[in-house]
Amino acid sequence: MRRRLAISSLGSWVGAAALGTWSHAARAQSAGVADDRVVLGQSAPFSGPAAQLGLQFHLGAQLHFEAVNAKGGINGRRIELQRLDDGYEPERCVANTRQLIGQNAFALFGYVGTATSLAALPLATEAKVPFFAPFTGAQALREPFNRYAIHVRASYFDETAAIVRQVTSVGIRKLAVFHQNDAYGKAGLEGVERALQAQNLAPVAVGTVERNSTEVATALKDILATRPEAIVQIGAYKACATFIRLARQQGYAGNFYNVSFVGTQALSDELGAMAKGVVVSQVMPFPYAPVIPLSGDYLAALKDQRGVAPNYSGMEGFVAARVFTEALARAGRNLTREGFLNAVEGLQNLNLGGFPVDFGPRKHAGSRFVELTLLTEDGRVRR
């Protein structure tokens, strides 16, 4: 229903402008803004093996946007988030991005994945459309600096450095890497290699899996043959869960470490009791209890959503929406894309209920927060 409403309202907006029925709104449309609303576009996986990442991020963002809209919106404008399914495939993401830009979305919000975001960002940059809070920590989206790319989360380099520090602090030296064979997996592999190199170490084995695949047999054989003490995984939840399950069945007793993009709750759900002892690095506040005011806000917003449990992907969408609306409010009533970007850069040393973000004119990565969590056999996540 929300999707139909968003598409319908966006279509009406574009249609009205085409007919020239409102002079002021037609002028505002050139900047992606109408008098009573601002429309955002999101391309993400809402089907396929990575669907839970897109669905939960979208739901988390909608929780905050709907609460804001219920109070009259920002500077009198409702926020509408139009979503399109890309199935976690770059080609579909490019087509979606062209459609969203062509329909004059004010900003692109909450894209999910490294390869998809890398495919979309050049289109956003060329059109001078803000590319806000992609659900990825890849360095290639952060360097070189791009004025139109805004990151709310820490990077994969931050996450893998934290993982390597933890692993080596307990005396582990034989570390293997299982990664998705694309830009996302390679970014994570580079992060692990950099962190290990600082200690004069290197991975003892590296295995890969293709995007949207669970064919892990070759990688499993190659990695287990080296008898690693721990395995870092840089992939989506279905492939990582398949690898863990098969490794345990073959008697592997070492630890598994995953970066946040895996989808913590989705991974736990896939593994069941086999999730015990799996470690996941997190870049967002703990979403399962009100450990900080921001977590409490998320849980309160989720309370009326029947059958929806809190999770890290939803929290990331909620936080991204919170940062977006803060910048939108500061941009003022005379809203333009450039004015919005200036407002983002003014979000310096901002405390979002216990979760700090800090942007600046040449600093579009707002957080470096990372903590490690442990999955349990009964489906819980422990800090």
Image (spheres, rainbow, N blue to C red):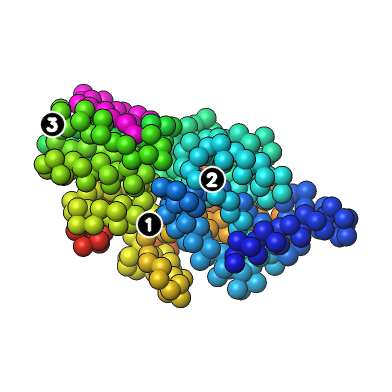
Q: Position of residue 173 (x, y in %)?
A: 15, 31
Residue type for callout 1: Tyr
Question: Is 11 rendered above or below residue 363?
Answer: below
Q: Position of residue 139 (x, y in %)?
A: 44, 34
Residue assigned mark 1: 312
Instruction: Please name which of the two marks, 1 or 3, marks the residue nearer to the observer.
Output: 3
Residue assigned mark 2: 86
| Marking on residue 227 | 3
Residue type for callout 2: Asp
Residue 292 belongs to the span the image colors magenta: no
Q: Position of residue 284 (x, y in %)?
A: 38, 54
Q: Which residues are magenta?
A: 186-209
Q: Earlier along the polypeptide chain: callout 1 or callout 2?
A: 2
Residue type for callout 3: Arg
Residue 207 belongs to the span the image colors magenta: yes
Q: Position of residue 189 (x, y in %)?
A: 33, 31
Q: Secondary structure at mark 3?
A: loop
Q: Earlier along the polypeptide chain: callout 3 or callout 2?
A: 2
Q: CA distance from mark 3 to mark 2?
A: 38 Å
Judged left or right of residue 118, residue 243 is: left
